[in-house]
Amino acid sequence: MSEHKKRRKVEICHNCHTLLRPEDNFCPNCGQENHDLKVPIGHLLFEVVEGFTHLDTKLFNTLRSIFLYPGKITKDFLEGRRGRYIPPIRLYFLASAVFFLFLGIMADEAIEQGQNGSLNGFVDKVSTTKSKEEKENKKKLKEASQKLKAIKSSNDTNGLYEAQQDYEEIKSDIEDLKEQTNEIKKQTNGWIDFVDLDAGEILDEMNIHEDDTLRTLIKNLPETKQRQRLIAIQKQIVLDSINTEELTDVSNEMSEYFTETIGTKNQLRYTLRLHSLKNNAKIQINYFQDTIITIQGSDGNLENKAYKERLLKMSDRELDSLLSIRQKRGRDLNIMGLKPLERGFLRNVTHYELAFENDAEEAIREITHFGIGVFSVMMFILMPIVAYLLKIIYSTRTHSFFTYPFRILRYLWDWILYLIRFRKTRKYQGIPRINEGHTRYYYEHLIFSIHIHSVMFLMIVIFVGAGIFLGYWRQALTATMFGFALYFIVALKVVYRQRIMKTIFKSFILFFLYMISFFTILSITGAIKFALS
């Protein structure tokens, strides 16, 4: 009644025009609420404040029961004491909204820290290596300098040239190390891709045919000479405007690979405008000195960046044709013959491959938030399944089914004792039925499942969040999971009222079945959402 006592009522129902009494909170004819919304702004503000206050009271009672009395909120709800608590579905949506918001923020923070941490670790490792090399070279430089001075002071010109050469070479090595270390430190402001660029990837982007001789020639070169040769080849194919086309959206790695320095002390740096061969085009290049070879472009099936961008623009019919070809070549798995899922899966895989090439950090962030979205959907699907598991495990009929062989033996033994006159009367009159006893309704288990998942979300947000704030998130996560396991056992004991050892045994069975269901539903939900998104 407290919800209606401050409301402004009307005398006639606006929906069905039935006469209303002052005490009617709802129309007795159509059920519409007796509440006149044509009220001053002050009255509306009062109702808003009253609603929040009412929710705050329920929220306090709910949180108090959750954290101080495991299982009490479910027990009270099932016994009809519901007015003091937030309804289960509303509680779940509130807890899950806070949890997944928390998870998203923590994921972004982890990616940011992981980026900085990996870069800092990379720099520290490289700097340490460079420092050791530099110290060794300085020691060699000192020895070479002393040797050079000794030769000069002795007026013996024998070996002077060699000593000078050693001294200049070691000095040059030290300068190169300093330059490399400084260059690495400059790169720490951006993301360092976890995949190194190799000659095969570059030839793919240049659209060189898979069976072309150039691939074998480059592969057989030492890695220190591959870059120089590829730059020389790129300079030649750029000149052929008929059989080549300029690459667009070249990655930073590719640009750096084809960047040269002219003159001393980095006076001039320039990047080639990279070109690739057109499909099936053939051109001649000077591979080495007077060696002329013919190189050929692919037939359009080489999975380079241009191919992937073209794939994303294909129609469903073109994509179905491509999938048939790829499956014949053994490149793709057949997803139960479901073409829409196959198309979506291929498009999304290609999208993320390109995303990693363009901006690995943003791609990781996108995949992480996609995973959180899958997790939220999966948990909503998992709750009714967990309720069904509870119904099976805590059903007296399930217990009756598993104990049926023992009850039959007991019944037969009673008959034997009666027939041989050890007993004057039979102890068990009727033949045992395979399903005996009563069981709880499904919705009762569903309420418990909703409450326990809500509790898990809230515990992770509060305790793990506090651990992150204090700098001990690993310990906080471990303690939270252990505490939740104990909470779960106590809640089962309170709600289902069975002996503690029996409850612990059933909790282990539930945990095992829960993990199987969790990963199964997560895999199916993730695959379907990935293919359809």
Image (cartoon, helix red, strand yellow):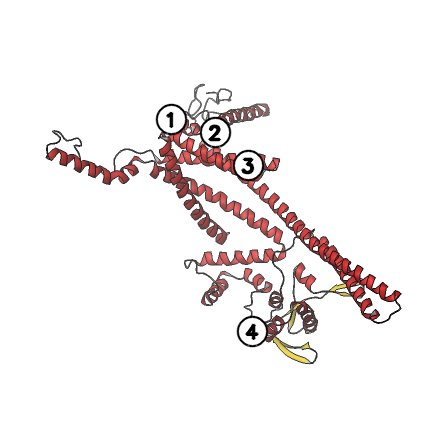
Q: At label 2, which amino acid type do we have?
A: Ile
Q: Where 5 sits versus 192, above or below?
A: above
Q: Residue at x 59, y 58 (%)?
A: 354
Q: On residue 481, which mark appears?
A: none
Q: Give the SS element for disc 1.
A: loop
Q: Position of residue 244 (x, y in %)?
A: 65, 71
Q: At label 4, which amino acid type do we have?
A: Asp
Q: Rate crowding at label 2 as few (under 14), some (14 to 19) or many (20 or more) other CA atoms within 10 Å.
A: many
Q: Earlier in the sequence, mark 4 or mark 3?
A: 4
Residue linked to disc 3: 476
Residue linked to disc 1: 79
Of tags 3 and 2, the one toward the viewer is 3
Q: Position of residue 437 (x, y in %)?
A: 27, 33
Q: Earlier in the sequence, mark 1 or mark 2?
A: 2
Q: Earlier in the sequence, mark 4 or mark 2?
A: 2
Of tags 4 and 1, the one toward the viewer is 4
Residue linked to disc 2: 66
